[in-house]
Image (cartoon, rainbow, N blue to C red):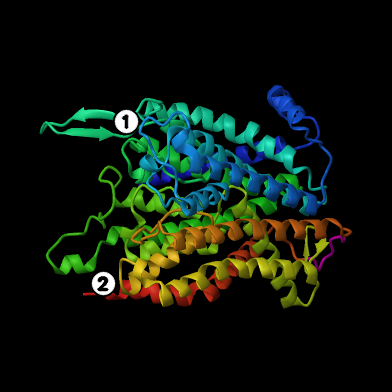
Amino acid sequence: MVSIVVVLLIAVLLAKPTGHYLADAFEYSPTRIDRLFGWLEKPIVRLSGIKKENQTWKQYALALILSNAFMILVTYTIFRIQHWLPLNPSGVAAMEPTLAFNTAISFMTNTNLQHYSGESGLSYLAQMLAIVFLMFTAPATTLSAAIALIRGLSGKPLGNFFVDFVRSNTRVLLPISFVTAILFVTQGVPQTLEPAAVATTLEGAQQVIARGPVASFLSIKELGNNGGGFFGVNSAHPLENPTNLSNALQIVLMLLVTTSLPFTYGRMVGNKKQGRVLFTAMAMMFVLMLGVSLLAENAGNPLLNTMGIDSSQGSMEGKEMRFGATQSSLYSVVTTASETGAVNAMHDTLTPIGGMVTISNMMLNTIYGGIGAGFLNVLMYAIIAVFLAGLMVGRTPEFLGKKIEGKEMKLIAVTLLIHPFLILVPSAFVVAFYQDTISNPGFHGLTQVLYEYTSSAANNGSGFEGLVDNTPFWNITTGIVMFLGRYFGIVTLLAVAGSLLAKKSVPETSGTFRTDQRLFGVIFIGTVFIVGALTFFPALVLGPIAEQLTLKP
């Protein structure tokens, strides 16, 4: 428990300075950061033919989607021809078409859902040229979109997607991941292009030990809230997460940018108190989810206790002994709250309530959320909270001096509905017509299906496993869900930013609802939980809650 407090305290202490750094990094007027990274950015901008003119929301959204679509096509091609390319010492075969389709979309959408085994599904070249490449470009895309939305809310032009995209990589992702990759190497994480090592065990048998450029993969995996594992068991693998220090560093990296964005927002819109209110509200939701998970996982399994099996030290099924139930619970909450998707324990083996916490984090998709994308959802819920508060007092709602009217709320309503639609509709279809891919009958099987589509729609990528998911059906359906779950909300919220930007500012009066006070934080939390409960609670009752009730002796 002390280690949990220390790790989370480090994350909190880093949030504000990181947030202020991000605000400066995306400032278009000259700053000291320009001198630090200009030598790298100027050649990229010149060679790419990037023009620094401000874009409209339509131009920004079109540039984002077309560039991402092109990268999906390129990486799909690499997966299909990796058996012909160099740096393939293990002779990995080409990916099957639907699996390549799923994997390319998965990593471009920051989901990193893996229907293949990490160490055996890709060559070294595909890992570096396709997977790690997308691990940089995917978070850079949503971080750029979040910054554009913040600019629009503050009354400034949205900026230029390509400039923001370059800065996301050169000023944020590349320097931090480079330093942390070296730190991971010091903890024993491999960084090599040598083929798998062969060792002789004490019994005289030959053991093949997979390895590769893992440290560089791991750093951007956590920093960019990507989550895909170099090895099949992700950060439960002793070479991907060898020590408690590497485990703590991974947690801090997952939270680093996501916790800092409220402070970036507060500084860029000129209302630091509002940024602090949003940060505090999300922290309170995070602590609540963590507390429920810790209680559930450390309580053990009551059925085992009745069978004479002591589980008083916590539910250890599917967990690493070096981390235990407590650190596994912390990791599971952080990875789903930050929409990273990395795991250091198998979520399929969590207690029903512990598993429900991870699904709920992804269903709400606002408890910090992934790099950029999560904060887009936070601002969406903030506008909804302002709208509801305005209705209660009979005033036209205002947010940062702009009136929230029918056009904006229609866009937000559609954005709010697409998330549960992408989860509940395909889950219902599978339960009704495709049950042969579910390994567990009853309540747990429903939870597995819900988790798969929730993880896809929220662009998280962690798996409950237990599904026969590497099939054309699962590859195609989750690929579509990941794509729509990623880009639909980005486009609609950029449209909201463009609409608000075109409006004149309304002077603040005594009747204006203040969004930089504790009352707004309470309303914001209530809005998130009420909307989430109304949408997803029936499905959770039929899945993890019903399963928990069956554990009663």
Helix, strand, or loop for circle 1? Answer: loop
- CA gap, disc 2 and disc 1: 43 Å
Residue depth check, mark 2 versus mark 1: number of the one nearer the observer: 1
Seen at 67% across and 56% down, the residue is 490
Q: Position of residue 37 (x, y in %)?
A: 68, 26
Q: Position of residue 317 (x, y in %)?
A: 25, 55
Quarter where residue 493 is shown: bottom right
Q: Where is residue 141 in the image (x, y as percent from the top left)?
A: 65, 45
Residue segment shown in magenta: 506-512
Residue 383 covered by magenta stretch: no
Amino acid type at circle 1 is Ala
Task: Tell me the tag on residue 281.
Answer: none
Q: Can residue 317 be seen in this view?
A: yes
Seen at 76% across and 59% down, the residue is 495
Q: Is residue 196 above or below residue 291?
A: above
Seen at 68% across and 24% down, the residue is 40
| Left or right: where 358 falls relative to 277 | left
Main SS of the magenta part reads loop
Judge by depth and name the residue closer to the eye, 353 or 163.
Answer: 163
Judge by depth and name the residue closer to the eye, 239 or 58.
Answer: 58
Q: Earlier in the sequence, mark 2 or mark 1?
A: 1
Q: Is residue 512 above or below residue 371?
A: below
| Left or right: where 146 falls relative to 355 | right
**Mark 2 vs 1: CB contact within 8 A:** no
- CA neighbours of label 1 inside 10 A, class few (<14), some (14 to 19), many (20+): some
Q: Name the quarter where the C terminus is drawn.
A: bottom left
Q: Mark 2 points at which residue?
A: 551
Judge by depth and name the residue closer to the eye, 167 or 248.
Answer: 167
Q: Name the residue under label 1.
A: 196
Q: Where is residue 63 in the image (x, y as percent from the top left)?
A: 74, 47
Amino acid type at circle 2 is Leu
